[in-house]
Image (cartoon, rainbow, N blue to C red):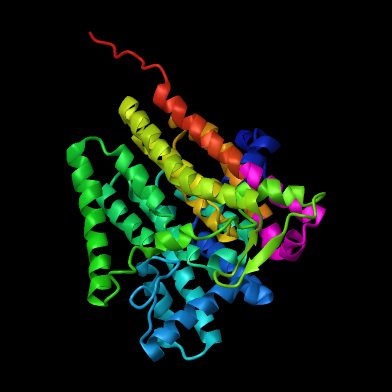
Amino acid sequence: MWPVPSPSDLSTSPKAVGQDILRSAIRVLSSWPALWVAFALTHAWIIFQTWVFGGQILGDVNLYEWWVRNGMNTGSWPVFTYAWVYPLGALGPMTVPALFTDTTVAYGWVWMGMVTAANAGAVALLGRAKPHGRAAVWFWLFFLVMLGPIWIGRLDGLLAPIILVALLIAVRRPALAMALATVGAWIKIAPGAVALALAATARDAKAFLRNVVLPGAAVSAVVIGIAFAGGGQDNVLDVFGEQGDRQLQVEAVAATPFTVARLWDSSIQVEYDDVIFTYEVLGDGADAVAQALDVALPLAAVLIAALIWWAARRRPERVGDILLVGAAAELLALIVFNKVGSPQFIAWIGPPVAAAIALGSRSQGTRRTWFVPAVGTLVVARLTMEIYPLRYGEFLGGWPFATSVGALRNALLVALLVGALVRLSQLAFARKVPTRTS
């Protein structure tokens, strides 16, 4: 005979069954085996795309190799012998692949393996963050897929995990986060945005000295000491002068009016600079914008740091949220007010969102604060890949669709920055709730 169903079996509704299936799926997707399979597939896809696009992605890596091989063979090293477009610390990761390879192809493989290993370390820490670290891992991997292969073929592929780890540990271990951010800033300037946020959120002078000044100074002393030991004391800070000599890059946010105007104004010209290997907008107007950005960028960074400081003083109980929003604002400012607009810069803005997803809770309003920025960040990443490498030739040629994609991407970057500043202002200037006393 057939078994008689129990009352509990009869009461199981399709809705309850669906909820059980959903919970089971979430458990599977949140497991470490699933996360590492997703990590492997993500990086395999990115590396495959890297080789499909070839020199468009690994062109800079080939340049890294040339600098290092030339130094090994002739003794003429960047910074130690001549001024360079990167800080001295960038030589470290550039040199590692050359120590284990003899060919350009092998150098590229080791470079991508090194970036993948760095990202694996960041993902391992991200997935362990409470309360939503594993959901944050899915966001992070999806963000990298949307951005495409450009991040793995640049120094920014190493910077993004550094920024992510620094933000994850910033509240619990601020001194270590500061040391890590300083190391990153000596590779490329972007992690300095995290250092600014850490400085602005230090709770008092003693904490500022212990958690910001001492670790930052210690790391910088080591780097500068190496420069002096190698005879590069005259060039160690020349990276700032090298950046100051650059003109308005065609992908930069501030170049958008010029790229759009090219649709009807043929007098606006874009030219390749074969010294720094970028395409720049020509003309007096573009030159004036580039000079204005030289002032606007540091000014914006300082003003945002002041807003972070005020928000942290007004709402010390929300210092973790303020630090993440502040770091996002600083990183976005580094892109929006930058006369250089390289596509790999977008890798900087994923870490604050991933860290916020991992560390936030419903009671803190994380979903409300970060949902729209998370979606916007993914869209910006996808539009960036559409520009580079998919339609870069069309973008440089001023084709309408590619130009529109670039303009939309840049408008979204401005919107994300404005949103971060609005949120910081809400935290900084919100009316304090009086404390009840018995």
Q: Residue at x 60, y 44 (%)?
A: 413
**Tag count in the figure?**
0
* Residue 363 against residue 349 in the figure, above or below: above
Q: Give 295 or 38, whichever is nearer the viewer.
A: 295
In this orientation, does residue 108 appear?
A: yes
Q: Residue at x 58, y 70 (%)?
A: 277
Q: Give 424 or 395, whichever is nearer the viewer.
A: 395
Magenta region, main secondary structure: helix
In this orientation, does residue 328 appear?
A: no
* Residue 384 against residue 118 in the figure, above or below: above
* Residue 391 is one of the magenta-drawn residues: yes
Q: Quadrant of residue 227?
A: bottom left
Residue 203 placement (x, y as % from top left)? 25, 35
Q: The C terminus appears in which quarter of the rendering?
A: top left
Residue 214 placement (x, y as % from top left)? 20, 52
Work out which residue is located at the far left of the displayed protein and give it.
206
Residue 263 placement (x, y as % from top left)? 80, 51
Q: Is residue 225 left or right of residue 408?
A: left
Q: Which residues are magenta?
A: 384-412
* Residue 243 is one of the magenta-drawn residues: no
Q: Give 263 or 306, whichever is nearer the viewer.
A: 263
Q: Is residue 115 left or right of residue 390?
A: left
Q: Residue at x 20, y 41 (%)?
A: 207
Residue 409 placement (x, y as % from top left)? 66, 48
